[in-house]
Image (cartoon, grey):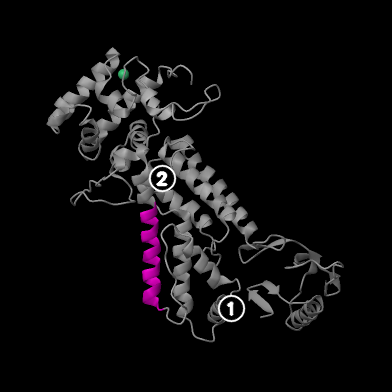
Amino acid sequence: MSHLEHADDMAVVSYSAEGLQRHLNTFARWCGNNMLEANATKSWVMIFGPIPSVIPVLTLNGSMVRYTDRFAYVGITFQSTARNIFTSHYAAKASTARGTRYSVLGIESYIGDLPPKEGRLLYMACIDPHLVSAADIIVDVDNTALALLEKVQRSFLRQLLGLGQHSMRAPLFTELGLVPLQYRRLILAIRYLKYLISLKPNHYAKVALEDSYDLYLNNHPGYWMDLVYALQRLRFLVELPSLPSLTAELCEKLGKAVYTAAMCDLQLDVDNSTRLSLLHGRREPLEKEKPKAITAVLRHYLVLVVNPRHQKAITRLLVSQHPLAVECLRYKKRYHKEIVPRNLRRCRFGCASVETVEHAMFFCDQTDELIQWCTTFVLAMSAQLPEILVVSTATATAVLRSLVFNRDAVCQVAKFAHYVFGVFADTALVWPEGY
Ligand SMILES: [Zn+2]
């Protein structure tokens, strides 16, 4: 195929400089016969593959056409000097998405904190389209390029949830009900594959697909091999059927298998993390149905807790991004080059216990303020959960889970967590001797 036309955006392709010049001459003649003017100053030449020692001079309508190493054709930026010709496209889209992210979050200077539900909606409407740009035809085989887009996605979601830039990856998706970009882009590529196989045999896109399949069978890179590679490198293997056996129904199943793989990936991260122990075995309290296990959904507390400070406190409580010692002493700091073992991350108010969420919320009795908050909270909750009156270190985690995953209690838990974290954050952390 020697030329592509999209309205007045045209691309002419040739294997040789002489061939390309002939195409340009024909193109200029055709334009002249059709009352059109080909403009050399708005045209560019790109060389894909080895650059010749003498760069050929190409002309259009007698004017020299300049060379470039990157150009956007029909919204997709091609780069001739990178191993992956779409490298620039990823960078351009990451940059646009980043700009949009600032605009979306800029709303907060007018309305205050953006609620997660609305933030998620704005993310899908304004940022996601840039991050999935051309995902149907550019299959992700380049981790570095994909990472540019993933960084923008994670950064926005963290800010929306009020989490630090080093918070864990999985909760960003499990709490907001989103799919990680690697999977989302692959699902879109499979949806496009379903469209491609539905085309008539003489449709150019169908011919190109079959061509890429032949290349794959002969062990040459191409669209099909990219798809196989992208599916194989998922954490949970998903196999691509052969092209002759592929049907619309199989494509649907394939898309669902990739979605399931994404959910298994997230669930495994949650289950394997000791920091996310409050989320282990969680059953989402639904509004009109019985609670059930759902890996990723917009969580009840992100909708029900409307006070932004309380809502951020309960989010930090659940994903372990709070100011308590059990979390903060996990990391090295400028003057503290050793990680403190968990059993030495003791309460900053002088208790012998490790400063965990359970200790801070139920057992720490070193400040009057904490005792007062805790007593009020326990009394308020005792009608709904009598076990809270006899809470012990053995039952504290279960009691806390019952309170958080109760739609009627969650607002009060969030408020309580906010005040408890505030009391601890107001007092400096105590680093044990030698750390
Ligand atoms: Zn204490």
Q: With 287 as the anchor, is 214 left or right in this view?
A: right
Q: Quadrant of ligand 1?
A: top left
* Residue range of the region highlighted in magenta in the rendering: 247-265
Residue 104 place in picture, x, y as percent: 49, 44
Question: Which residue is drawn at the image coordinates 80% and 75% (left, top)?
Answer: 17
Residue 151 place in picture, x, y as percent: 53, 47
For residue 249, what is the image quadrant?
Answer: bottom left
**In 3D space, how far apart are the residues under numbered discs 2 and 1 (Cα atoms)?**
41 Å
Could you tell me if residue 295 is visible in this image? yes
Question: Which residue is drawn at the image coordinates 50% and 26% (left, top)?
Answer: 338
Along the viewing direction, whichever of 246 and 62 lies nearer the viewer: 246
Q: Give me the disc on residue 174.
A: none
Name the residue beneath numbered marker 1: 218
Name the residue beneath numbered marker 2: 172
Mark 1 residue type: Asn
How crowded is the residue under tag 1: few (<14 C-alpha within 10 Å), some, or many (20+)?
Answer: few
Relative height, residue 207 to residue 396 (above, below): below
